[in-house]
Amino acid sequence: MADAHWRWIWLLAAALATCGSAGQALAAERPRAREAGVVIGTLAPGPRNAIVDVPGVAVGHATVIEGDRIRTGVTAIVPHPGDLYRERVPAAIVVGNGYGKLLGITQVDELGELETPILLTGTLGVWRAADALVEWQLARPGMQEVRSLNPVVGETNDGYLNDIRARPLRPEHVRRALDTASVDNVEEGAVGAGTGTIAFGWKGGIGTSSRRLDPARGGYTVGVLVQSNYGGRLTIGGVALDALQPRRVAAREAPPARGDGSIMIVVATDAPLDARLLRRLASRALLGLGRTGSSMSNGSGDYVIAFSTAAGLRGPGGDPAPGRVVLSNDAMTPLFEAVAEATEEAIVNSLFRARDMDGHRGAVQALPLERALPLLRPEGQAAAPPR
């Protein structure tokens, strides 16, 4: 890495190690991985390094923090700004390990299309989120005669920081996430569906990243958004961070660090892919998950939802449109590389951007960057002092 990157990291570590206002300010604005000099993979990201780099894709969050025991929320991913019910996008869902509650999966598997936005939330909020999504979409113009709708809602269990049995998610939270969805949204960490999540014993959350292929390889963009709430052996850029262990808080229950948990991975691309090719793409996102140290344990729900925004492939279902063109199998390898890298970096961003949080059953520490970054330094390269 360049000396400038390591001067920035040296300053970050020094500031975070202090208790003064400068350290607190830096802690409040924790960097994304690339901002800290941690570069995942070799492919170039899009301009915002986020799922919203795929044209038309919008993201919205509603964060629900109430008192000292409610820490949850909802995140909406909207594939395009048009009428999603009538301009359905090709889609596929891949299950890495099926210990989860993913609504809408069978119809997506059967028809290979998505007709609603995707929602992510906490486990016991799935059905309330789905009901609110149906109400929101049925109220949209042109939906008066619709009598069937397939809401797609995924989850991870935020029951350590959040009083999950209280089921605090309300319709207004879902509407807020949908109505505020923006093509500029790159909020990460403890926001929306990531408010109460934990990864590797550290505070997890929402993370996003993208890759843009060069024109010779198609020029397509692949964007990924994750809701990280799983465990294993934390590995960043091929470096296992075994030396880092979350601190125990006296008289409080320790946060979970074993493999059980879950992760939701949403993949968007503007490449012209049908459901079969999207399934192939989604399965490669699990490579990025594995690179971070996950073993997809028995108690982990690991799901990938992938869709294509290519305008020529949208439609109300039924027979393919005349002249519809999709990529060949031979053209998929660059996209496979892109989705694996973007998934890995999105997960790292979810950890880098998250902050310490106290909640229902205890406190969870954010990944201590002042300790993690020196371990990620290339072997033999010393951090440059500030000038």
Image (cartoon, rainbow, N blue to C red):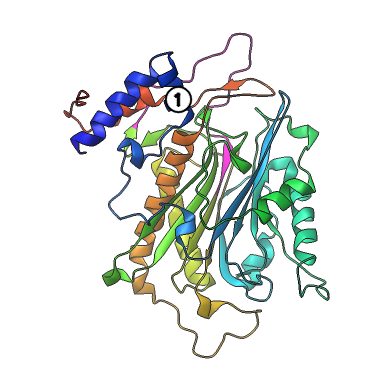
Q: Is residue 248 magenta?
A: yes
What amino acid does circle 1 point to?
A: Ala
Image position of 112 with respect to 237: above or below:
below
Which quadrant, please, contains the C terminus? top left
What's the residue at 52%, 23% (across, down)?
365
Horizontal arrangement in the rendering, residue 331 relative to residue 131 (left or right): left
Which residue is pictured at 40% across the width and 22% down the height? 244
* In the image, farthest residue toward the top: 250
Residue 96: percent from left, percent from top:
53, 51
What residue is pinned by disc 1? 25
Using the rendered image of the protein, determine whether residue 358 is visible from the camera's viewpoint: yes
279 in the magenta segment:
no
Image coordinates of residue 242 in percent, x first then y, are 38, 25
Residue 133: give x, y in percent of width and height.
Answer: 74, 57
Residues 327 and 39: in front is 39
Q: Quadrant of the N terminus?
A: top left
Q: Nearer the viewer, residue 211 or 239?
A: 211
Count residues near mark 1 (Cα–Cα under 10 Å), then give few for <14, some for 14-19, many for 20+: few
Image x and y of residue 358, in percent:
62, 22
Task: Judge whether 249 appears above or below 228 on screen.
Answer: above
**Residue in view at x 53 percent, y 35 percent:** 204
Along the line of sight, the residue nearer the viewer: 268 or 17: 17
Segment colored magenta: 240-264
